[in-house]
């Protein structure tokens, strides 16, 4: 059903690490490097253990802005099921993390998942443009989950 190819609206940029005798610094995001209108509404850090998969899932309105900086590496998967998208039916994947530090903006309705492919727990920073469950966590969660659906077309290899 899906074939390898680019995903319209996907923003992928390298993350530079600036080090000196004190340690290091990375810029997670800069307003001048994001599409107009995309400003993070919150930020969180998650740990994913070796071999564990998060997703696949999608958001109706939310864009996720992930920073994969290590430790460890992830295989990142994206699928474009959006009717009318110029990249409808495409699947894209890449290794991101310590060996390939990247910021990734995933547009709404693009299904996404990642698997920790390293021997270390991996950290992922997400700065989405919507609050989880809205203000005061009083609204429905903007998420459609596929990981427990045996007939899901979004398969991790």
Image (cartoon, grey):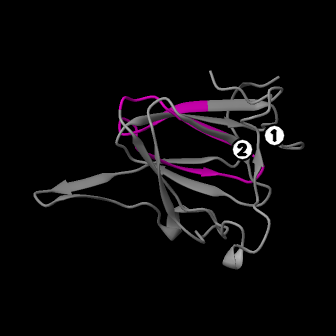
Q: Residue furthest left?
A: 21
* 122 relative to 66, above or below: above
Q: Which residue is rendered at x = 62% and y = 62% of the image? A: 35
| Residue nearest the observer in this picture, 127 or 33 | 127
Whether tag 2 and tag 1 are in contact, CB under 8 A, the answer is: no
Q: Is residue 57 magenta-colored?
A: no
* Mark 1 nearby-residue class (10 Å; few <14, some 14–19, many ≥20): few
- 26 vs 157, left or right, is left
Mark closest to the chain's N terminus, 2 or 1: 2
Q: Is residue 110 magenta-colored?
A: yes
- Quadrant where the C terminus sits is top right
Residue 86 is tagged as 1
Secondary-structure class at tag 2: strand
Q: Which residue is rendered at x = 65% and y = 26% of the image? A: 156
- Quadrant where the N terminus sits is top right
* Mark 2 nearby-residue class (10 Å; few <14, some 14–19, many ≥20): some
* 99 relative to 22, above or below: above
* 130 relative to 150, above or below: below
Q: Which residue corresponds to mark 2?
A: 57
- 124 vs 3, left or right, is left
- 59 vs 20, left or right, is right
Q: Which residue is rendered at x = 20% and y = 54% of the image? A: 19
Q: CA distance from mark 2 to mark 1?
A: 21 Å
**Quadrant hosting residue 131:** bottom right
The range drawn in magenta is 93-119
């Amino acid at each position: 059903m899906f074939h390898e190819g680019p995903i319209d609206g996907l923003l992928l940029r390298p993350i530079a690490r600036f080090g000196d005798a004190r340690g290091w610094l990375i810029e997670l995001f800069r307003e001048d490097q994001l599409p107009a209108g995309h400003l993070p509404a919150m930020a969180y850090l998650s740990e994913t253990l070796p071999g564990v998969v998060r997703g696949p899932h999608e958001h109706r309105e939310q864009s996720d802005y992930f920073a994969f900086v290590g430790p460890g590496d992830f295989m990142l998967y994206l699928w474009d099921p959006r009717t009318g998208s110029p990249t409808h039916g495409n699947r894209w994947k890449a290794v991101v993390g310590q060996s390939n530090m990247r910021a990734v903006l995933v547009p709404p309705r693009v299904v996404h998942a990642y698997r920790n492919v390293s021997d270390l727990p991996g950290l992922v920073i997400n700065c989405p443009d919507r609050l989880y469950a809205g203000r005061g966590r009083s609204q429905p969660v903007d998420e459609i989950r596929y990981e427990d659906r045996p007939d899901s077309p979004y398969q991790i290899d």
